Image (tube, helix red, strand yellow):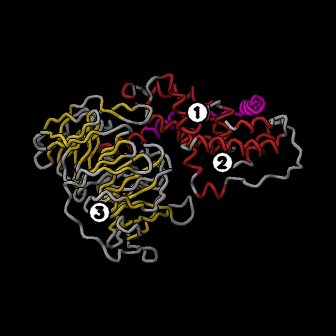
Amino acid sequence: MTERLALLLRQEADTLDVPTAPADAILSRGRRVQRRRRLVVGATVTAGVVAVAGLGMNLPDRAHFRPPTDPAVASALNPAGWAVASGSTLSLGNGATVTLPSKVKSIYYTSAGSVVRTGKASYTDGSDSSYALVTDDGEVHSLGLQLGDRAPSSDPTLPYLAYAEKRGVVGHGDWTVVLRDVRTGDVAATIPIDGAFSWGGWEAPPVALDGDHVYVGLDDATLEVNWRTGEVEDAAHLPSSRFPGVTAGHEVLEDQRGNPSAVIDVATGDRVVSDLPAGPAGASLSPDGRYALLIPWSTCNDDYVCVYDDPASQVVDLSDAASTKLDIGDQAGWTPDGRVIRVTDGAVDLCSPATGDCTSTGISLGDGPVKVGGNSYES
Amino acid sequence: MARTLTDDEFAEFVHAAWPGLYRTAYLMLGEHQLAEDLVQTSLAKTYASWRKVKEPAAAPAYARVVLANTAASWFRRKSWRNEHPTEVLPDAGTEHDPTTRTALVDALATLAPRQRAVVVLRYYDDLSVREVAYALGISEGTVKSQTSDALARLRAQLGEAAVPHTLGAHRD
C-alpha cells in the first residue's frame, strides 16, 4: 500500500516554490556538452574560438610531480592490435575472442594490448566502470581501477592509461594527471596541475594522451602536460572548455556552427587540412595521425547503440587533402595502424583509407551493444 | 529529430519539463540550490543527447532518466558521501506529525542518498523497479533491498500510518 507515502511526497512537492527555468543558461550548457560529445566522435574544436587561453609555462610542482622511474619508449603501432566488442564479448584483430564479466563500454588501444572499460550498462555515463587489459593472447588482467565517471585516454604506442583525479579539497582547481602502467596496474607517473573544471559533467577533466603529452581540458585552458618532465603549459593552439582529442600531434577544428572544418598541427597551429567537406557530425583522426574519417550523424536506440543515418562517408588523407569515398556501415572505428574498422549488421570488415577497398575479417558479432576500437565513447 | 530542434523548441521543452524535474530533484536532494543544479545539468545533457529521443513525447521521460543517472553519479562521489548522507537513524522516540512536510523532509534526510532517490523515483515518480534500476544504474535487486531498508527508516520516522508495514514486506 504505497498510496499514503506517495500522497505525502506529492503534497511535499506541491508546496515547493519552483524557480523559473533558466532556459537560456541550460541551452548554453547544452551546447557545451554537445560540443564535448561531438569531440567524442570527431575530436573537433571550434575554429572560431581557437583563442589561446593565456600563454605560459608552469614549472613542475616538484612536491607532487612523480616522474616515471622507467618511462616507456613508444612502440610501433600493432596492425593486429585492434578490437571490437558486442556486449561482453571482445573480438581481437588476431582472431582471439574474449568473454568479459560485463558489457564493454569502451576500448582503449595501448602498446600492451586493448584496455577495456566494462560495466553493467554499455554506455559510459554511469560510474560502474571497471578496467582491464586484454593482451594479444586473450588474457584478461584487471587494472583494479575505479575511475567513476571520468574520461581516460590511451596512446596505442604506449603502455599507459592516462586520467585526471582530484587533488586536495573539492571545489578547488587542483588536479593530478595520472599515468597508469597497464602492464602492471601501477601508477607510472603523476603530474600536478591547477585550474578550474566546471564545463563538463565528469568527475575530473577529460584528457588525451598523445606521445609525451597529456592534454587536459579545463575551463580556462587546455593544458599540455609533459609526463616525462612534468612541465605544464597552456596548449597554445587549442581552445579551453573542450574535450581534448589530440591524436599523433593533430586535432580537428570545428567551425562556428560546430561542424568539423579543418585539422591542425597542435605544435605549430598550422592547418594541415582546411575546408573539410561539410555535413558530417564530426571527424575522427586515425591513431597514426594520417587520416581523418568523416563521421555521419547517427541515431541511437534505447540501449544507446548508435547506427549511422547514412553510411556514405569519406576519408581524408592529411598529407594531401585527397578524399576517398567509403561506406562505413553501421559503425566504424580504427585499427591502431590507421585502417578503418567497419561493422555492418555484425559483420566486421577492414578498409583501406587510401583506396576505400574493404575486406572481410570473417568476424560476425553476436548480440549486444557494439563498440568499435579507435573510438572514444565517453559521454 | 535533434537536427531540426530549434532553440525555441528546446526552450519550450525546458519550461514544460522544469517544474516536474525540479520537484523530483528537490525530493531527492533536499536542497533547492542542488536541485536546481541537478535539473540544469540534466536538461543540458538532454539537449546534447537529443538525437536519442525518438519522439517528442518521450523527451520528459528521457530527461528524468538523465536526471536520475546524473544524481547517481553525484552520489558516488566520495565528497558527497562525506557531506550529505545521514546514515544514523534519529531518536525513534521523536514524535512527528506525518501530515507535515517538515516531518517528511526530515525523514527523507535520514536516508542515504541512493535510498532517497529510490524512494522518490518509486513513490513520487511512480517508476517500476526495473525503471528505477535503469535510471540509477543499479540492479533490480538493489532497488528492492534499498526500498525495503528505506521504508523501514521512514516508518520509524513517520509512523505505521504513513508507511504501512506491508510496504516493506513486498519489497518490489
Say which residue appears at 63% left-offset and 35% top-offset.
B22
Q: Amino acid at mark 3?
A: Ala
In the image, which residues are magenta? A1-30
Question: In x, y percent, where is residue A368?
Answer: 39, 38
Q: CA distance from mark 3 to mark 1?
A: 49 Å
Point out the frontmost of discs 3 and 1.
3
What is the CA distance from the residue labelled 2 to the residue labelled 1? 25 Å
Question: What chain is tagged by disc 1?
Answer: A
Subunit of mark 3? A
Q: Residue A15 in the image: state x and y as whole percent.
A: 74, 32
Q: For residue B6: magenta?
A: no
Q: What kind of element bears circle 3?
A: loop
Q: Residue at x 26, y 54 (%)?
A: A247
Quadrant of the image for the C terminus of chain A?
Answer: top left
Residue A55 visible, this orientation: no
Location of the N terminus of chain A by quadrant is top right
Q: Nearer the viewer, residue A53 or B26?
A: B26
Question: Predominant secondary structure in magenta?
Answer: helix
Binning the other alpha carbons within 10 Å of mark 2 as few (below 14), some (14 to 19) or many (20 upward) gives many
Question: Callout 2: residue from which chain?
Answer: B
Local crowd at mark 3 within 10 Å, few (<14), some, or many (≥20)? many
